[in-house]
Image: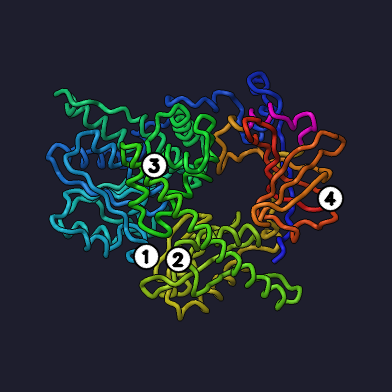
Amino acid sequence: MVRRRRSIRRRQRPAVPAALERAFPGVLAALYAARGVTDPAELEPGLGGLHSPDALGGTERAADCLAEALEQGGRILVVGDFDADGATSTALAVLALRELGAAAVDYRIPDRFEMGYGLSPELAADIADPVPDLLLTVDNGVTSVEGVRVARERGMQVVITDHHLPGEALPEADALVNPNAPGDPFPSKHLAGVGVVFYLMLALRKRLEARGWFDGGRERPNMARFLDLVALGTVADIVPLDRNNRILVEQGLRRIRAGRARPGLLSLLAVAGRDTARLVAADLGFAAGPRLNAAGRLDDMAVGVECLLTEDPGEARTRARELDRLNRERREIEGEMQSQAFETLRALDERLAGADLPRGLCLFDREWHEGVVGLLASRIKERTHRPVVVLAPGSNGALKGSARSVPGFHIRDALEQIDARHPGLLSRFGGHAVAAGLSLDPDKLPDFREAFDALVTESLEEADLAGEIVTDGELEPAEINLATAEALRFAGPWGQGFPEPVFDGRFRVIDRRAVGNGKHMKLVVAPAGARQPLDAIAFHTTDEDVPPGAAHLHLVYRLDVNEFRGRRTPQLIVEYLEPA
């Protein structure tokens, strides 16, 4: 399937406030202004700029429950999730509780292939006797109405920490901490699951201090030492980087750059070939996060959690190598699934004979792996610029699916609408605005496919599916240099909601060749009106995407630093290209 052409819109550059012009070089000042920054103080990364834990609803009651469990020597079980946010949330909760003096802390990650997501009734019933005195969910639980009921019937106190959108009814837990709970006053609604846990542990330490817990000589732990985990989980979960999250991520990055991170995280970055001294947020998102996620996709996320928990560097290296092996296996599986999916779409293109694809795409193959459907849905969404659901057979006989969406179509709310219009069609669903999960019976797939496409068609116009790319405009040839690339690299942290700068312009093609077994394209280009050649790399791009005779290309790119044999040069990371 040929990549659909995309429209390019340049981000409006407002007048740059004088304070920004004085504080930053011209390019950076303009970029910050375009992202809504008006005062350099908004970019200060100090921990003093964080919102107070007192502002997060439910922390007072949750801290009381946990403090009582610690004082009574109670057993605590942390129930996590099988993605990177869930793994970092679990590790942070276990480590912090142990350092705060908890007598017995263990964790449980549900098997995604047997029990599915979160605190399900099956998981609550499966917890072996003697049951824990307190069950703490991290990165899940706000929709676990039945799971909480079963856990409490078995005698457990239940404290929920989550950041996902709640359903119509809240579970009857002993305490619930979620910035997205109805009426919660916390100013930042974008905390990742690990961020919510971090805030609760701050509140718990404060509560224990007030109760005299540290008066007898117990060490009062420094919670900042867990910020490497907070940074990893926040970036990997692709939550918007508002000011609060940018502070959390930047402080975690600084600890990692200084070598003061968990041995497992340092080992994950080492097997990925990342230089921790020059680490940026994207390295967490594209190197450490996928390797951690691979355990939950293909095996058991306990492998990832143990990697983050261990204090032994040797064990950390061993576990990181195992996660790296799983990630390579995941790539192979994803590559095969992607080839099959694109062939299916190519055949559909031909069958439609010039008509456009369905606005809501729903793909299924009985050979696909349920742990990788989310990644495949993202790839297809990037290619087709429309909401996508990808399903695979689940181990319990149901179909397990992941959905990815485009701006203007809230995918979790869409599934809720489908569920309301067609009761019983979906067995389970949940998620966010741009990503969601679902399950349904195999015999209901045709009805779901029809209902999904109908709702997307009803909600979005063809113009909404144009795949618009928003750029920061052109850089002058003199600005495309190593100094600008270095400044951009460390001017973040960049991420969702505070996007990394992307530029566009017309370039003359000097050389081109396929690399990576023909999957990617290496280019040598020069900006219009300049002779100085520049290296560029276009991932997941082939001759099918670029006519061989194209002498000039319109590139959308990020300006980055390429390090090779001790030499650092500017390099264009191509996000999109088309003949000029």
Relative to 102, residue 369 above or below:
below
Q: Name the residue under label 2.
A: 370
Query: Percent x, y for residue 311?
Result: 31, 36
Which residue appears farthest toward the front when viewing the image?
565
The dot on residue 317 is 3
Do the residues under discs 1 and 3 have CB atoms within 8 angstroms? no
Query: Percent x, y for residue 154?
Result: 16, 59
Please name the amino acid that badge 2 sits on.
Answer: Glu
Do the residues under discs 1 and 2 have CB atoms within 8 angstroms? yes
476 magenta-colored: yes
Relative to 22, residue 512 above or below:
below
**Front residue of 331 and 385:** 331
- CA gap between label 1 and label 3 equals 27 Å
- CA gap between label 1 and label 2 equals 8 Å
Do the residues under discs 3 and 2 have CB atoms within 8 angstroms? no
- Does any portion of residue 33 appear in the rendered image? no
- CA gap between label 3 and label 2 equals 28 Å
